[in-house]
Amino acid sequence: MTSQPDVLAALLADPGSSLVAVDFDGTLAPIVARPEDARAAPGAREVLADLVSRLGAVAIVSGRGAAEVVELAGVGDVAGIRVLGHYGLQQWHGGVVASPDPVPGIAVARARLADVLEGADAGVRVEDKQHSLAVHTRGALHPDTELAALEPALEGLADACGLEIVPGRYVLELRPPGVDKGAALRALVEQTGARIVVFIGDDLGDLPAFDAIDALREAGEIAGLAVASVDPNDPDAPPQVAERADMVLAGPSAVVAWLAGLVAMLD
């Protein structure tokens, strides 16, 4: 585990070689029942803009589409910020989204998903992310039971379509193998030449980014800090995230406040 003061000292000594990357849902924005209702916590856009003007690179890394995150976070006019969507498959920078075509298996899974979900609780919903398909059970009468009941069939569908299934908070997501926030963070480090890296996340999908920080700092390539956003009022927060982190913040409002403190130290 890395010392927060050591990494912050390195960042303050060389802000131009520093990268701060943050997840969106549960990190910059409170978790809500419907993904489309999510909005960044008060002050999030402003503090990100402040950091962009002071650091080598600032990024939002999300499982959502990049353009959607730009809109929900309100950062479309923040010059220089990078937004990686679909776990890094998409990148928005300077108002332009670079995005590959979805892998063929997604279309096949999309066509078969209704049959797999036949008989599921009426509260189960599918979020079609173009590059992946997320099955949410938060709205079900018994979300945990429903998630466990659906997992075998969804795993079978993923296998048949050449996809992998990735768990999250009351969600199972079918997506291309080898696509995760760890790969996205490594790509950002390579693109920006960052030597000091801070990543903040809240869910199981953020653990690969924590793994990337571990590997890069063990190799001596970066000074890195893995930060967990854990809202104490959220009973669904996966305990693994806090256990793996170097530091824990109490949800999106605390994340914004910590980033604002970083801005103050950089002034």
Image (cartoon, rainbow, N blue to C red):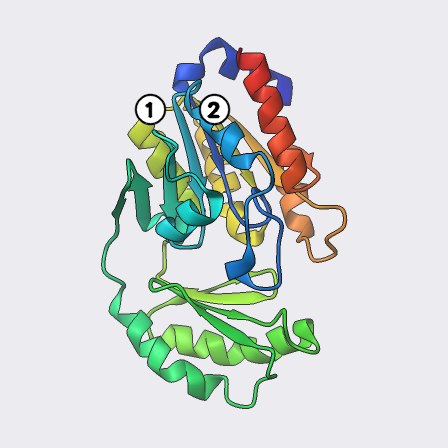
Asked whether, in this view, residue 78 is left or right of residue 139, the answer is left
Residue 88, percent across and down? 36, 47
Residue 239 visible in the current orientation: yes
Any part of residue 3 in sight: no
Q: Amino acid at mark 1?
A: Gly
Using the numbered discs, state the Cα–Cα distance from disc 2 to disc 1 in whole angstroms: 17 Å
Q: Position of residue 8 (x, y in %)?
A: 57, 18
> Sequence-wise, which precedes: disc 2 or disc 1?
2
Residue drawn at point x = 36 percent, y = 76 percent = 109
On screen, 46 above or below 108? above
* Disc 2 residue crowd, few under 14, some 14–19, many 20+, Cα 10 Å: many
Tell me what residue is drawn at x 55 percent, y 44 percent.
40
Q: In this rendering, would 103 be left or right of 30? A: left
Percent across and percent down for residue 69 are 43, 48
Element on which disc 1 rests: loop
Residue situated in front as seen by the camera: 101 or 190: 101
Question: In which quarter of the view is residue 201 placed?
Answer: top right
Residue marked by disc 2 = 51
Residue linked to disc 1: 193
Label 2 amino acid? Leu
Q: Position of residue 141 (x, y in %)?
A: 70, 78
